[in-house]
Image (cartoon, rainbow, N blue to C red):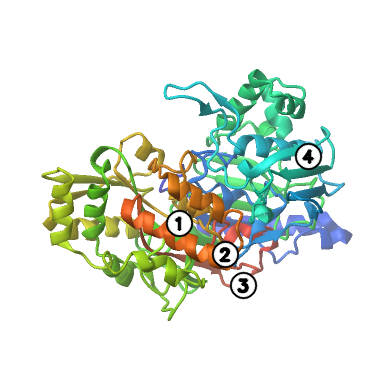
């Protein structure tokens, strides 16, 4: 992880001069084909700072899903779609096309671009679809202490568990995905998206499996186990220790290097078959970088972070700044064991929270919305405030948890059989907004005999909740530290479903699981309204999480930048980084 001195490598004027030399050299090199390169007045390398760590190439694992993999790598590992600024999936026709075939069960035919090829020269193929499905369907298990456990440590099964099979001839450019009868997943357009299709040929080679598709089709558990072992841990990104042969790209950028003082360097993928990136080099600066110094030094041109998270953040006159609410719900994710082993204890904590004050002071910096996303305290975990279902979904809250009820919190704590209750709150730090949240909550809850301790750290992961190292996680949707959320209920709902990888609090309720499964396939408006209301009633009663507000985001970019479009979803501002241009 970059340290506080990451950007202090050379005087600012020296770096700017070097950039001018690089730009001039590039212009001379392209000569008559200047249209294929950058003009002399264009900055050839742009810095992009995010508020999350980048620790893996595979953001689909339990460890990888809360990280900034999607923010950083959406234009490195492309797929059938990406999450656009509205929160909905946008088809990426550079990668391929998808068409629904007639029949009783949902069947989708995917056709890959004939020119699609990884940066190592291996063609993109339906093998990648088979691997994604195998990893996410939850069917392949091995014995564990408490019974069978999934071989693939996948963060979510949403949609993939509904697929009956993926028809694929190894190496082919088309795949037919057949969903189980009655399980026509409504969100199928979001499957096999950016960062979800990992290079199957790398996994197969590393696992010593010549025919990945055949092994999965035949149920060869020994081979599948080796594939899963690599899928789970083989794509870790450790600064200074990259094996680039395991990191081929299917997008306009590829990883060139990753060091503590140089960031994650993305360069143009020469084998990309689509439109060339407008800027040939992007440096991703993960959380822990000295963003303020980087902006002053000219090493950071785009910033996408949680509003108020950076202490002393001051972009200055050289940057345009936008602040807006996101599709991620800032929330406490609670353990369902330890001090929070009873619903009474969890309700005690919820009752002492000053949720209205938290929204007023931290939830809408720089903007005021009369309604919809960002307009107030959020009372639903899975239903967005700008949907017609929201009023009925939040009825179960009933105003009981908006302002502190110290007497009620004390009674609930006593009903849980606890004379005192100590709550350790973990989050990925440093994060000034979350640190302030913990301080405000600690002051409020002290009167109810509830001690709240700040357990934020630079190496925090929500897996600490499952391990009993903390009692609550302060994060966004599905426990993500940075950018998160889409326009559907799936990510938030499945993060509370029994057995889902990113259900870090280990919440389990059979009826809630049934509701989530029905919401995945039932498009009826009346049914959805009833189901969403029932889901929230269960959640307010059981209290596995406590929603606060729609997470506000700050997006800043250098004046003169072109095509930087805020994307208040899991994709973040980097969703279209290959279109960014900065002229000096």
Neighbourhood count class around disc 1 (C-alpha, 10 Å): few under 14, some 14–19, many 20 upward: many
Disc on the earlier residue, 3 or 1: 1
Q: Could you tell me if the residues under marks 3 and 2 are in contact, i.e. CB atoms within 8 Å?
A: no
Is 287 situated left or right of 17 in this image? Answer: left
Residue shown at 52% from the left, 44% from the top: 65
The residue identified by callout 1 is 291
Residue shown at 15% from the left, 61% from the top: 406
The residue identified by callout 4 is 126
Q: Could you tell me if the residues under marks 1 and 4 are in contact, i.e. CB atoms within 8 Å?
A: no
Between circles 3 and 4, the one closer to the viewer is 4
Question: x, y percentage for residue 407?
Answer: 13, 60
Between circles 1 and 4, the one closer to the viewer is 4
Between circles 2 and 4, the one closer to the viewer is 4
Neighbourhood count class around disc 4 (C-alpha, 10 Å): few under 14, some 14–19, many 20 upward: many
Q: Could you tell me if the residues under marks 2 and 1 are in contact, i.e. CB atoms within 8 Å?
A: no
Q: What element carries label 3?
A: loop
- Quadrant where the C terminus sits is bottom right
The residue identified by callout 3 is 560
Vertical relation: 562 (above or below) 79: below
Disc on the earlier residue, 2 or 4: 4
Q: Residue 567 carries which label?
A: 2
Question: x, y percentage for residue 268?
Answer: 72, 49
Nearer the observer, 320 or 207 = 207
Vertical relation: 227 (above or below) 110: above
Q: Residue 498 carries which label?
A: none
Disc on the earlier residue, 1 or 4: 4
Nearer the observer, 261 or 49 = 49
Q: Could you tell me if the residues under marks 2 and 4 are in contact, i.e. CB atoms within 8 Å?
A: no
Q: What element carries label 1?
A: helix
Report the Cα–Cα distance between label 3 and label 4: 41 Å
Neighbourhood count class around disc 3 (C-alpha, 10 Å): few under 14, some 14–19, many 20 upward: few
Q: What element carries label 4?
A: loop
């Amino acid at each position: 992880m970059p340290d506080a001195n990451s950007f202090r490598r050379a005087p600012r004027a020296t770096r700017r001069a070097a950039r001018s030399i690089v730009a001039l050299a590039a212009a001379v090199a392209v000569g008559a084909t200047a249209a294929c390169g950058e003009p002399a007045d264009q900055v050839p390398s742009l810095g992009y700072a995010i508020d999350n760590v980048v620790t893996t190439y595979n953001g689909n694992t339990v460890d990888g899903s809360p990280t900034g993999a999607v923010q950083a790598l959406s234009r490195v590992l492309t797929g059938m779609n990406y999450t656009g600024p509205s929160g909905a999936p946008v088809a990426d026709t550079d990668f391929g096309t998808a068409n629904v075939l007639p029949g009783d069960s949902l069947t989708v035919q995917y056709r890959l671009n004939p020119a699609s090829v990884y940066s190592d020269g291996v063609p993109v193929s339906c093998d990648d679809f088979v691997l994604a499905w195998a990893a996410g369907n939850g069917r392949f298990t091995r014995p564990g202490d408490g019974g069978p456990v999934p071989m693939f440590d996948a963060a979510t099964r949403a949609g993939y568990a509904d697929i009956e099979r993926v028809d694929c001839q190894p190496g082919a450019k088309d795949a037919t995905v057949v969903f189980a009868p009655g399980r026509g997943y409504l969100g199928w357009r979001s499957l096999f998206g950016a960062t979800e299709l990992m290079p199957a040929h790398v996994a197969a080679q590393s696992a010593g499996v010549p025919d990945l598709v055949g092994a999965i089709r035949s149920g060869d558990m020994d081979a599948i186990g080796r594939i899963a072992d690599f899928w789970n841990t083989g794509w870790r990104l450790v600064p200074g220790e990259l094996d680039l042969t395991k990191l081929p790209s299917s997008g306009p950028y590829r990883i060139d290097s990753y060091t503590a003082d140089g960031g994650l360097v993305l360069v143009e993928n020469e084998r990309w078959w689509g439109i060339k990136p407008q800027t040939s080099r992007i440096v991703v600066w993960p959380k822990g970088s000295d963003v303020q110094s980087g902006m002053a030094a000219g090493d950071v041109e785009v910033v996408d972070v949680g509003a108020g998270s950076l202490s002393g953040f001051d972009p200055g006159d050289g940057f345009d700044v936008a602040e807006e609410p996101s599709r991620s719900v800032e929330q406490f994710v609670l353990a369902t064991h330890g001090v929070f082993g009873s619903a009474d204890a969890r309700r005690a904590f919820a009752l002492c929270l000053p949720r209205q004050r938290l929204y007023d002071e931290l939830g809408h910096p720089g903007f005021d919305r009369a309604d919809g996303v960002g307009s107030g305290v959020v009372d639903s975990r899975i239903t967005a405030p700008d949907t017609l279902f929201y009023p009925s979904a939040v009825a179960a809250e009933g105003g009981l948890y908006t302002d502190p009820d110290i007497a009620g919190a004390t009674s609930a704590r006593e009903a849980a059989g606890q004379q005192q209750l100590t709550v350790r709150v973990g989050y990925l730090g440093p994060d000034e907004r979350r640190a302030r949240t913990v301080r405000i909550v600690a002051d409020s809850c002290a009167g109810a005999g509830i001690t709240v301790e700040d357990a934020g750290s630079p190496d925090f992961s929500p897996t600490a909740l499952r391990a009993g190292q903390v009692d609550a996680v302060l994060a966004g949707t599905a426990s993500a530290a940075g950018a998160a959320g889409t326009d559907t209920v799936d990510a938030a709902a499945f993060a509370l479903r029994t057995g889902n990888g990113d259900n870090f609090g280990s919440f389990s309720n059979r009826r809630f699981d049934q509701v989530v499964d029905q919401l995945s396939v039932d498009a009826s408006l009346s049914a959805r309204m009833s189901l969403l209301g029932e889901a929230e009633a269960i959640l307010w009663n059981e209290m596995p999480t406590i929603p606060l507000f729609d997470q506000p985001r700050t997006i800043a970019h250098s004046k003169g930048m072109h095509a930087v479009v805020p994307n208040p979803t899991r994709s973040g501002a980097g969703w279209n980084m290959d279109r960014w241009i900065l002229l000096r």
